[in-house]
Image (cartoon, grey):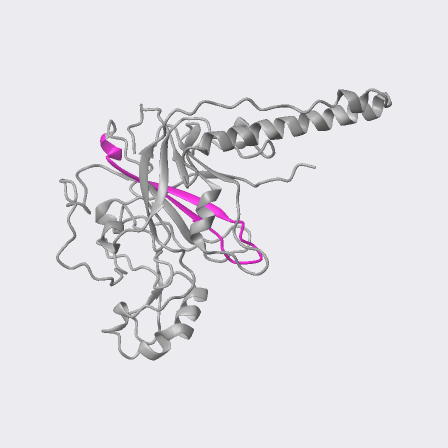
Amino acid sequence: MAAAGARPVELGFAESAPAWRLRSEQFPSKVGGRPAWLGAAGLPGPRALACALCSRPLSFLLQVYAPLPDRADAFHRGIFLFCCREPPCCAGLRVFRNQLPRKNDFYSYEPPSENPPPETGESVCLQLKSGAHLCRVCGCLGPKTCSRCHKAYYCSKEHQTLDWRLGHKQTCAQPDHFDHIIPDHNFLFPEFEIVIETEEEIMPEVVEKEDYSEITGSMGEALEEELDSMAKHESREDTIFQKFKTQIALEPEQILRYGRGIAPIWISGENIPQEKDIPDCPCGAKRILEFQVMPQLLNYLKADRLGKSIDWGILAVFTCAESCSLGTGYTEEFVWKQDVTDTP
């Protein structure tokens, strides 16, 4: 990602990548799978990663590697976004920021190699360098353990039950093997690398407005005002949606727009946050837009189910303008969800 002072918009695209490229030591930006945690200490716990609406464990949606090169304490910096995918809720969202100096306890001072390591197997690492154990189902902090083998860790009773039903019941007596035999729990989203490109300038198109004058000419004043109000609303909606479509026209597959401090592009005129709707950081600083997740990402998630599933128009992620250092752990930030609304 670009340095803090740069203002060009960077676009993210989902692409397949080998598993080794998506591990923590490669500092990836990625969608789905298990989180590639940046700092191995101070991970958000099960309570922080529970849906505020239905209390079920959240699913990891994506992470963006967004260092601030002019800040020694944020040489490495990542934003981690989680969402609820449990119907009928599918509404909870939480986002966390973590940052580290270049010299730290977890990573080499030198950049990672761009060549695959000698061992490029698909085995899942469920213990961090800090010693923290991760849940076998979701890859988040796992403080609970199987009472029989004491080798399997979980974030919650729900995930322990799910893993037991899908295979741990059989492998519990063979703890030396089950780390490499993790079943598909149908909980993780498909995994992709987020590849970044800089957006080119796009010329805005002129949006034509409908003329209601002939309709309203012979009508009463009250009805005329109502129609005029509707026309203005539809015209504003059309303008906003047309601007959105124009902005993404050159790169319609973009799943993410990154630009720290830029203005988001909204998909609708409804539910646009005001400044008062974006809470300040606990440090006292304002929060600014860091990136927005586009609806095109939904095409990659294979999350459609009968009934309700995850959906959004725009997910706008706001982070501390000062990117404050509140300890070595993960600081919760703010995400605003704008749905697609049907204009009457």
Q: Position of residue 189 (x, y in %)?
A: 41, 55
Image coordinates of residue 150 in percent, x first then y, are 30, 71
Res. 160 image quadrant:
bottom left
Which residue is more in the foreground, 145 or 318?
318
Residue 137 is at least partly visible in this image: yes
| Residue pictured at 51% horizontal, 49% vertical | 92
Q: Seen in the image, is 313 located left or right of residue 184? A: right
Q: How many marks?
A: 0
Query: The N terminus lies in which quarter of the figure?
Result: top left
Relative depth, front residue between 49 and 200:
200
Q: Is residue 181 above or below residue 339?
A: below
* 246 or 13, nearer to the observer: 246
Answer yes or no: is residue 278 visible: no
Is residue 259 positioned above or below 293 on the image? above
Q: Residue at x 56, y 32 (%)?
A: 241
Residue 129 lies, in percent from the top left, at: 21, 54
Q: In this rendered view, identify the residue nearer to me: 67 or 117.
A: 117
- Residue at position x 58%, y 56% in the image: 308
- The image position of residue 202, as x and y in percent, is 42, 25
Q: Is residue 287 above or below residue 213?
A: below
Residue 70: which quarter of the image?
A: top left
Residue 79 within the segment the image draws in magenta: yes
Does residue 191 sit above or below 274 in this rendering? below
Where's the C terminus, which quadrant?
A: top right
Residue 191 shown left or right of residue 26 in the figure:
right
Q: Per the image, is 193 magenta?
A: no
Range drawn in magenta: 72-98
